[in-house]
Amino acid sequence: MSDVTELQRWEGRTVLDKDGDKIGKVDQVLINDETGNPEWLGVTTGMFGKRQSYVPLAESRFVGEDVQVAYTKSHVKDSPNFDVETRLEAEEEADLYAHYGLQYMPLEAQAPVAGHAPEAGTVARDTDGTQTDSAVTRSEEEVRVGTMRQEAGRVRLRKYITTESVSHTVPVEREEVRIEREPITEANAGAAMSGPDLSEEEVEVTLTEEEPVVEKRVVPKERVRLDKDVVTEQETVSAELRKEQIDVEGEGKGAGPAR
């Protein structure tokens, strides 16, 4: 991952904090000497970009053309400052790990075995005949586990309109004509016989009726929003680690098994 193309993916990009606020720009990417992978982002901050802070690349993710880290802007700016050109010293890296609450796991120092320390001034020769000391260095690989945050998907709310049919029963009224016949009596004789004996006449009555009326209005019913919850799961990662072993070969009184 430490090739030029990979480093160019990071350098020069705008760095956002966990809340989306701008921190600065990526000035350099520091490589882990043991794994060869990018490990720290050197971020220029301040009004004129003269101050550089370091933030773990782990849990960082691309958001469009920007890089979002898993820490707040103030946390990054309060990180220890070092004048770093190519690599962090072990003490500097340990201070940064402590600042970000991460576990620092340096390679174990090799200590001589009790009772088998070489005598001062002992001279030995390598298999090619060159003179060297009487010791070899044994190394082994260690694993450092972290996480990197990346975009897993997007969820959006979309509102659209559907149409459904509804039915309501409404009582309506209408007028109808009813013919009533009444005999001539003393009570109505005056009105009944007030006209001529014989004549033509028309009487008109207006009838009314009710019609159903539909009125629609928009009524707010509920509010729907998106929110996020953080769910923690346990995942197991495996790696093959190599380590060097030392055997003693040779014959003679001074030769013995390696410990």
Image: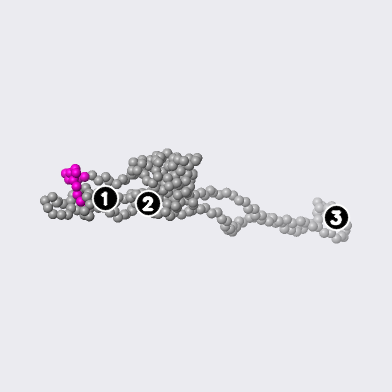
Residue at 63% x, 55% y is 170
Would you name the residue on which mark 2 appears? 37
SS type, badge 2: loop
Q: Which residue is mark 3?
A: 193
Residue 31 appears left or right of 113 = right
Type of amino acid at the residue the image marks with label 1:
Ser
Residue 4 rendering spot, x and y as whole percentages: 42, 54
Q: Residue at x 33, y 43 (%)?
A: 90
N-term-proximal mark, 2 vs 3: 2
Is 116 covered by the magenta stretch? yes
Few, some or many C-alpha atoms within 10 Å of disc 3 (few <14, some 14-19, many ≥20)?
Answer: few
Report the front residue among 227 and 56.
56
User: Which comes sooner in the sequence, label 3 or label 1?
Assistant: 1
Furthest residue to the right?
A: 196
Residue pictured at 85% horizontal, 55% vertical:
193
- Give how far apart the Cα atoms at labels 3 and 1 are: 137 Å
* 73 versus 2 height, above or below: above
| 15 to the left or right of 209 | left
Picture coordinates of residue 161 (x, y %)?
57, 56
Please give the name of the residue rendered at 19% of the width and 44% of the height, measured from the top-left corner. Answer: 121
Is residue 214 something one can see in this rendering? Answer: yes
The secondary element bearing badge 3 is classed as loop
Q: Nearer the viewer, mark 2 or mark 3?
A: 2
Q: Which region of the structure is painted magenta?
A: 112-126
The residue wearing badge 1 is 139
Mark 2 touches mark 3? (CB < 8 Å): no
